[in-house]
Amino acid sequence: MSDTITAVRAALLHFIADPAITGDQAYQYFPDGLLIVKNGYVDQIGDAEQLLPLLPQSITVNHYPNCLITPGFIDTHIHYPQTGMIASYGEQLLDWLDKYTFPAEMAFVNQAHAAEVAEVFLDELLRNGTTTALVFGTVHPESVDAFFSQAQQRKLRMIAGKVMMDRQAPEALLDTPDASYQQSKALIERWHQQDRLLYAVTPRFAITSSNEQLAKAGQLLQEFPDVYLHTHLSENTDEIELIKQLFPDAEDYLDVYDKHQLLGSQSIFAHGVHLCDDQCRRLAETDSALAFCPSSNLFLGSGLFDLAKMEKYGVKVGMGTDVGAGTSFSLLQTLGDGYKVSQLKGQQLSPLKSFYLASLGGAKALNLDSKIGNFAKGKEADFVVLDYQATPLIKYRLEHTTDLAEKLFVLTMLGDDRAVAATYIMGQLAYQKEKV
Ligand code: GUN
Ligand code: ZN
C-alpha cells in the first residue's frame, strides 16, 4: 500500500525541553516551516524552502499564511460530564459539588445522554485545538463506554476513567469498594490500549472514597501497572480540613493517597494549590504529576498555584482546564489565567513556558512524551493551526510584531477558540474554523 502523506506550511514551533531549564535551546522555530506527515506520524519538519523541493509533485501542500502550527494542546485535567453545567454561579468547591455537579452527573446513568454530551465535549476540545485530554467520567461505567466509543471513532488519544466514590455524595452516585473495583477492571479490559485510548483509575478525591475503596484503587494499579491514577488533591481549604477529620492517621492530604500506593509516574493529581514543602518533595520523588488549573482555581476561589515552587522541587506539571469548574475549554485562555495567577504570586509565567506546558510539558506529565507533545520524527501527528489574525484586535496588536515570544503572549492573553484555524488528528484535518 502506498504511503499517505500530508504536508502543511506555516510558522512552526515545538519544544524539545523545558524553556525554564534550557532557555533558547528548548525549542525549534521555523518562521516559514513545513511539516510532513507520513501515515499519521511526523516524518520531517524544517524550512519550507528547503523541504518543498523534496516533496513528490503529487502532494498538495496546505498553506496557512499568518498562522503558527504547534503540537495539539494537552489538557491534563477535565470533566466531560460537567460540559452542561459549566459557569454555575456563586459557590466554592464543596457547595458547588452538592448544588450543581452531583445533580448534573446523576443524568449519566443514561448512556444516550452520556453519548450526546461526549459528542458536544469532543467537538469543543477540537474547536479549541485540544487533541489529548485526561478526562473524568461519572460513577456510571456507561459514561466511560460512551466517551471512549466517541473518542475511538475520532481516532483520538484520550485517557479516561470511571469515577470511584462510595461516600459523602448522593446515594444515586455511590458505588462500593467492590463494585468500583469490578467495574473499573472490566473497563480497563475493554478499553485500555484499544487504538489510542488509555484508562485512568479515578477515585474522585479522598473525601468521597473510604480507605477500603482507595485500597481497591491501589490494587488496580498493582494489577494493571500501565494504567493511570487520576484524582484531585489539595484544592480548597475546607476540603483539606475535612480530609484531616476523615483521615486522622494520615500525615497530610497527599499521605492519604501515598498510604494506598497511589503515587507514581502514571499518577496525575489535579490542583495541588495548598501543598507544603514535604508534599512537593514527595510528589517529585515518586515522579507524580500535578495539573495546574488556573481558571478553575480562580472561578471557585480555591487559591493560587505556586508554579515556581513546583519547578524548584522538580514536580511534573501540565495544564488543566478543569471544565466545569474551569470556565473555558481553551488552553490559550487557561494559559492567560495561569499568567495572571503567577502575577498574583509575584512570578512570571513566560510565553515560551506557557506553550511548553500546553504541549511537551503536558505530555511529560501524562508520561506520553514518547508518543505526543512535539514534532520529533515518529510522533503521532496531532497539531493545531493558530491564526495571528483571528480577531480584529489580535490582528491589530500583532501588526508590527516580529518577536515570537510577544506573539505567543498575545495569543494567550487575547486568544481562545477563535484563534484556532484548524485542528489535525494523525495528520488528518479534524476541525476547520468557518471563514467569517
Ligand atoms: N474535587 C472533587 N470533585 C471535583 C470536581 O468535580 N471538580 C473540582 N474542581 N474539584 C473536585
Ligand atoms: Zn476537577
Image: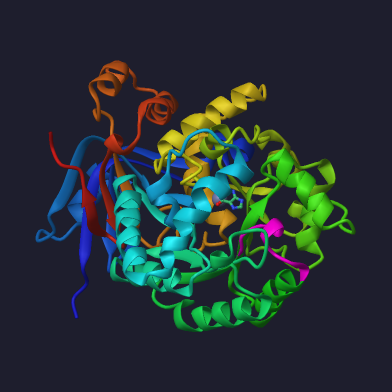
Residue 403 seen by the camera: yes
Q: Position of residue 214 (x, y in %)?
A: 72, 69
Q: Is residue 147 above or below residue 432?
A: below
Q: Magenta residues?
A: 203-211
In the rendered image, the residue lying farthest to the left is 58
Quadrant placement of the N terminus: bottom left
270 relative position to 195: left or right: right
Q: Quadrant of residue 171?
A: bottom right
Camera-nearest residue between 386 and 91: 91
| Front in this rendered view, residue 292 or 348 | 292
Q: Is residue 288 magenta?
A: no
| Rendered residue at 9%/61% (across/down) | 58
Name the image quarter holding residue 379. bottom left
* Applied colour scheme: rainbow
Q: Residue at x 67, y 64 (%)?
A: 167
Q: In the displayed structure, does residue 25 sit left or right of residue 273?
A: left
Is 282 or 106 nearer to us in this picture? 106
Across and down, in percent, residue 206 comes to 71, 58
